[in-house]
Image (cartoon, coloured by chain):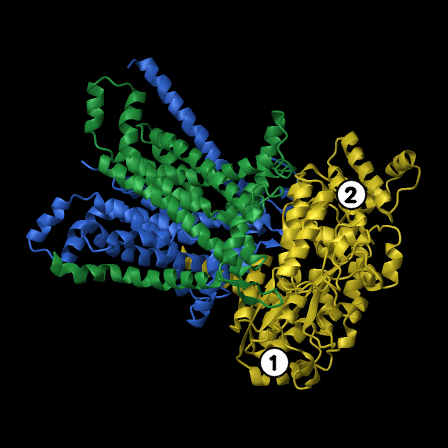
Chain colours: A green, B blue, C yellow
Amino acid sequence: MKENRKQVWGLIAPTLFLMIFIGVIPVIYVIYLSAFKYNVFAKIPFRYTGFNNFRKLVFDPDFLKSLRLGLTFVALCCGIELPLGLLIANLLTLNFKGKGIFRTIMTLPLAMAPISIGSIWVLITNPDFGPLPFLFRKIGIEYNMGINANQAFFTTVLVDIWHWTPFVVLTFMAGLTSLPNQPYEAALVDGANRWQTFRYVTIPLLKPVILTTLFIRVMDTFRVFDEVWMLTSGGPGTATRYVSIHLVRMVLQSMEYGYSSAMSLFLLYLTIIICFLLLTFISSSQEAT
Amino acid sequence: MSGGKKTWRMFLVYLVCILIAVATLFPIYWMFVISARSRLEVFLGPRLIQTSFYAPNYYRPFVQDVYGRYLVNSLLIASGNTLLVVCLAVLATYAFSRFRVPGSNNLFFWTITNRMAPPAVFIVPFFLMFTRLGLRDSQFGLILLYCIFNLPFAIWLLKGMMDGIPKELDEAALIDGCSLWGLLWHVIIPLAKPGIMVTAILNWIFAWNEYLFAAILTSVRSRTITTGLAEFVTVIGTNWGEMAAVSVVCLIPAIVFIGIAQRHIIAGLTFGAVKD
Amino acid sequence: MKKLGVAILLVGMLVLASSWCFAAVNNPEWWQKAAEPYKGVVIKGISESTPPSKAMVEVAAPEFEKLTGIKVEFEVTSWDEMYNKSIQDLQSGAGIYDFIYVEQDIIYAYLAQKWLTNLNPFIANANITNPDFDVEDFTTFINYFKDAEGNIYAIPFEAFLKAYIYRTDLFNDPEIKAAFKAKYGYDLAVPTTWEQYTDIAKFFTEYGKEKGIELYGHVAQAKTHPCVAYEMCETIWPAWGVYNWGINMENMRASVDKGGTLNSDQAKKAFRWYVDMLQYAPPGVRTYTWDETGAVFGAGKIAQGIIYLENLGWIATDASKSAVVGKIAVALPPTAPGVMDAAKAGKGYIGYYDGGALGIPHSAKNKEAAWLFIQWCMRKEWQGEFAKMATRVVRKSTFEDPLVKDLDAQTGGYFTMLKDQGYLFAGAPALPMHRPLNEVYLKWISKAVAGEISPEDALDNLAKEVDQLMEDLGY
């Protein structure tokens, strides 16, 4: 197939060209900015500072706290969404009447703009006139996102789960419906019960799908902004100021372009490393199956 | 399995499904309710049932204001971007999946990393670039820009799909004298169609919902509906009713789009899980 | 589907077009003549989606287009987005916008960067300046948009006070009055001291609880959001005698040992009071921004409070949004001892004079046409109607307009207060770096409001960090 090499490059070329245009040039610019102290509100807006931005980053308590919060948020969201998605996907691949309706319902949250989702949840969780605190009060729990940091944190997690579990369900459902039959027949012959079949047949077969979905969810949860900003704006205090929010505020409110460029690069490479580890894990597990 | 046990299990399945459906639908239901309320009603208290309907919430944005145009812009941009991304991704994935190009694995991984970048800081270079090139406030500019996170996603999704198509098929086709294009057109695309559809749908949803770049890079002519939604957040209060009404209208094209392709989603998203 | 949408849109536009009847124009010929050289030009502008901006977009711009043939592309959008876009445009010099929204507190940043066009040469040019345009007729608010030499850089189009607002029906209820007198030993009236304010807040919140109705004596914008920092800096601290965000304007430092007042005892006392008072506000007060404060007041759940009076228009007049139409009045906010005298002597201020203006970026491509449009929006004969649409006044002559006099009665004397006592209020201090500052203030203030840290410690930390930031920025 060597004579085809030119044609093969021809296939990749448009993608490559576009990605260099919109993917590489801006990154180079951001790398350039990260070496400057750049704030339009400073007396001297643009000043070379070398690696100082990165040095500052490592010792910045606000950044480190938000990073910790961000990672906790990612872990918690993904940790709940994936098992929950697996459960629902299993349920919806069973044979029963009306599952089509339930499948359609499950995709609806995906179709809503994050900013609408944020605003709807603001109204639902408002301590004075929202239905959720109202219901909680009926069972004797005082629910107030403005005071209780834990409640605020879990509300943002809840909203993320509500919004993105459908995505997980979709991918898992697809994975489940396309699993081969033989292993199941073999399990049946061996007399395995439902749980054993699920644990020892379905999970290993589904592993590549699970990891891929996890990969995408980790990337996207790490960048969450609109919903959380509408909902808590990072509060109460700094309880839900995830690193993505911290970064956006540094860029758009404080206008610290240089410092936030350094921060972006740091986060980019952190995500790349996390994802690279996941990817290696995926390919090794794919070879195993 | 006894009949009684089976009925009991079906009951359980329905119960769980209905619970999940209620949890999923409640916020959407609440959005409808809010969209039917005047500003005063929104702040009165948690009444779960709405009996009256406050029509100006729908009337003002779409008749007096230009949200209809925003909607058309959004449709154009999301569909245009989907078309572009799917075409490019099919070609690139075909190459990544079928041919051993030196460095292709690295290239593949690099493409994906583009989705990982935190977007906020990139508005500075993009603003400069797009203004210089005259792409600011044009639908075409956004169609191009959205490739940065949609193209990696599409390639990632499609790669799994194409890897799942048995290689024996294309060998047979090549022996029959099929060209590279012929192979793609007559073998790969028909087999990968469900996957392509899914990619298109998710891609469309991502483009439809994007806010940050649309907010910075458009002004009057090519504003999208999500940036229009942000306009309701004002100093004298968020116009919750109209915002909910526009969100409701926004849902319609998305539901139509998803509804049509529902079957393809299920059949399509396999990520190469099948390896017989 | 799409065709139907287009059809609906067309019908809507026709309806709109037919309703564009001209508001008063004194000398249309002058406008046509002045605009003659710029016919067909498209000018682009951006503003925040406030009611005054909406009025300009929906009424002033189409009329201007029709009369002069200059096309106006005016986008109004959310506060964040407006700033992001205008600052990107200004710093890159791209020249996208011909006129931009200049909020009073951002003007110092824009001036420091030389991002705005000096309007004095335009004002001096009789060809493009309407004879009715008279700088002297503008209220003192225009002084905020001048540089040290007195050159004007932007023309105000909106101006509000953030002041005290209360429910007349409750304050005049004989039963409530008697109960209050019995409890506190003096007559229920508009408070002039913070102690009285606290008593009244306590009284109404308890009264609401006793009667089982949703009524509270206090409201605040205490969400973790830029608004909580603004509330402290603009409203609470000045009325307690801590001015200029607690920053010493001479050396730009905030902590007491460097000459600032941010962690002074008085500032700490005021902040402690602010945090303590939240218990008398509705339980959800820590999720309120400037949005919900106005909304709950309009819903009739609040007896008194200090809110942005941009909201006054709809609270006082629009029965579809407000449950308290005809039941409200405004007054000066309460003050700590000595503050009122200082303000009257011009040595301090008691609250926030808030507003915005239209300026022309240094990089604008159609400066003259933009200047014509700015004057058009601020033309004398339209101001009364403009005030009716958006409860704002920027020209002295507008106070005499019958429409405004009418409104004054409906809003419980707001315009009289603006006219006679507006001088007691002040805009934001000259802090060019106020955006990054706000983020730091937000961090520590919201931490204390959430109870993560005591108000006193929060201010000590805040002062230290403000000093640090100032040094970082080269001030």
Front position in the image: C465 or A144 = C465
Image position of B24 (left or right of C122) = left
Above or below, comparing residue C473 to residue A164 in the picture: below
- Looking at the rendered image, the quarter that the C terminus of chain C falls into is bottom right
Q: Position of residue C40 (x, y in %)?
A: 52, 80
Secondary structure category for the residue under label 2: helix
Q: Position of residue A238 (x, y in %)?
A: 60, 43
Q: CA distance from mark 2 to mark 1?
A: 51 Å
Q: Where, by quadrant of the figure, is residue B132 drawn?
A: bottom left
Which dot marks residue C273?
2
**Which residue is painted at 51% across and 54% down in the image?**
A55
Q: Quadrant of residue A187?
A: top left
Report the residue that reaches farthest toward the right. Answer: C185
Residue sitting nearer the eye, C233 or C358: C233
Q: Which residue is mark 1?
A: C368
Residue type at mark 2: give it. Answer: Trp
Circles 2 and 1 on the same subunit: yes
User: What kind of residue is marked 1?
Assistant: Glu
Chain letter behind tag 1: C
**Is residue B139 among what the camera can see?**
yes
The residue that appears at 39% across and 25% down in the rendered structure is B14
